Structure formats: C-alpha cells, structure tokens
Image (cartoon, grey):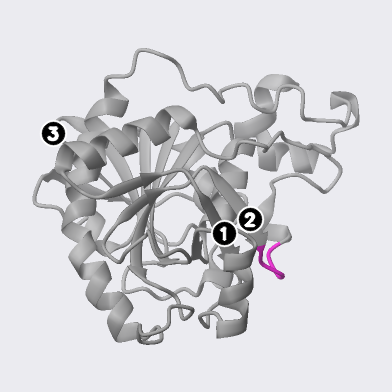
Amino acid sequence: MEKVQIGIIGGSGLYQMAELQNIRHVPVETPFGNPSDAFIVGELEGVTVAFLPRHGRGHRLLPTELPFRANIYAMKLLGVEYILSVSAVGSLQERYAPTDMVVPDQFFDRTRARAKESTFFGEGIVGHVTFAHPVCSELGDILEESCREVGVNVHRGGTYICMEGPAFSTKAESNVYRQWGMDIIGMTNLQEAKLAREAEIAYATLALVTDYDCWYEGHDDVTVDMVIEYLNKNVRNAQLILKEAVKRVAAKTTPNQYRDAIKNAIFTAPDLWPEETFDKLEAIIGKYR
C-alpha cells in the first residue's frame, strides 16, 4: 500500500484544489469497516497528501454515523504521521467572527452515543492514553503561521466543544456553553483527536467559523443556508492555508512527538492480549508486543 505522511480530513472543497496533482482514489479496508470514503491521494506542490472526505463525497453521513475508528485506522495503515483536520464550527464568543479561523488547543465532550467510536481499546486490551493536551502544539504553530502567511484572521487557542448533533444548539444550550467558557462548537473533531492520539498520530484542527450559533442577539439564528454561505467563503482560504501548512509540515526536521504515545498506556500484559483483538489493533500496538 502506498505510504503517505500527511493526512487531511475535511470537505469536498479541500480535495478539489487546482493545485492538487496526480490524483488517484485509494480505497482502504480496516478491521473497523470502511472509512467514510476512498482516500483522494495526490501531490500538493510536490508533497504527497491523503485527503479523506469526512462525511463522504456528497456529504452523506451524519456526525453520529461517521466511522471514526475506520477513518483514523486507515490513516495509520497509509503511514500517516500528521493529520490536519478542517472543520466548520459555530462561534460562542463575539471575538470569533464568521470567516475567521481558529486553531483550538482543547476539546470538551458533549456527545452521548459515541463511546464505541471514541477508542480502539477494549475486547480484552485496556488502554488509557494521556490526553490532557489533545492537540499537537507543533502542528498548531504551523496552522497559525500558515493562516498569517495567507493573511487570514486567525485565533490561536481556545476550546472546541463537541456536541452530538445533527440539530444545532438550542439558545439555552448555547448560552450555557458560553458561561462554561467554551469558544467554538462543532460535531466531529473530538473523536478524531482521541483516536489519533491512540494511533500515535499528531493531530490539529483548523476550525472555519461559519456562524455565531444562536446566542448572539441581533444575529439571525443559524440556518443551513447561512452556514453554507460562510463555509463557501472559507473554502478558498482553507485551501491556501493547507497548501502552506503541508509545505511546512513536510519541511519539519523534528519527529512526530506522539510516535510513542501509547508506550505506557496499555495496562493489559501482552501475554494476556486476545489474538483476535491483537490482530485488529496490530497496526497500532504491534510494536509493543
């Protein structure tokens, strides 16, 4: 299988880039089923990258339907060491305006039905990964620098609260999240970040602000049309940012800081690992047996 160091998760506008050359579709099978779609592998200014349309081409999958484990495991099978995740979010603070970019450094979980899709461990192998700092600071630096290079208004840091969806927040919920000090809200990135850490892949989010959620007095309540309008405005900026970020990641001289993230996280002794479970997780834990 072709090996790719840099993976990008996002929407269709991100792999339909004029600068992306030698495109090929690469299906990847995993022990956790099929990913959201085939990967779009190509060269971005000479750097090979693997794009995954998070919701499938044509946006067919709800956030609760996403095969998070298959998506991240497939990245691992491709040899990915760095994931840049691009995601539309709502703003919970006035300073984050629509069309701004945010590079969050924390996540807060408000999902209810994703326990199975939030970890690779279980079925006889117990692991508790360190997750105090869920975002790779080095990738965060690169995304921030890339935004500034492109001339986009960017905010570094803050907390992404991950809600269940698919409906947007009620006004009461939105106001509570603001009182908690949350900064932006989305429906997908927390599970990706958790699984990337377990897979020893560095992960960071480029959050595209599309709306003020529904808390902002004088601002229209969130509508699909509004989200799509601002998302389309953000797409070209995101393409330019990724183009710059990929170049910077490829030029890195330091190794992936999470390459041994689960070295001390597996509590079950190797001689007790069920063979069937080990076979499923071999791409991740094989080196620790």
Which residue is disc 2 drawn over? 108
Horizontal and vertical percent for residue 59? 36, 73
Q: Is residue 199 left or right of residue 203?
A: right
Label whose residue precedes the other's in the sequence (1 or 3): 3
Q: Amino acid at mark 2?
A: Phe
Above or below, 271 against 8 in this view is: above
Q: Amino acid at mark 3?
A: Glu
Mark 3 burial class by Cα count in 10 Å: few <14, some 14-19, many 20+ = few
Q: Main secondary structure of the magenta part?
A: loop
- Residue in the image at 68% along x and 43% along y: 280
Q: Are marks 2 and 1 in contact (CB under 8 Å)?
A: yes
Question: How far is disc 1 from disc 3 in space, using C-alphas?
Answer: 37 Å
Q: Amino acid at mark 1?
A: Met
- Residue in the image at 86% along x and 43% along y: 124
Which residue is disc 3 drawn over? 45
Magenta range is 110-114
Label whose residue precedes the other's in the sequence (2 or 1): 2
Above or below, 229 against 95 in this view is: below
Question: How far is disc 2 from disc 1 in space, using C-alphas?
Answer: 8 Å
Mark 1 burial class by Cα count in 10 Å: few <14, some 14-19, many 20+ = many
Quadrant showing the N terminus? top left
Q: Nearer the viewer, mark 1 or mark 3?
A: 1
Horizontal and vertical percent for residue 158? 50, 48
Q: Are marks 1 and 3 in contact (CB under 8 Å)?
A: no
Callout 3: helix, strand or loop?
A: loop
Which residue is disc 1 drawn over? 182
Quadrant showing the C terminus? top right
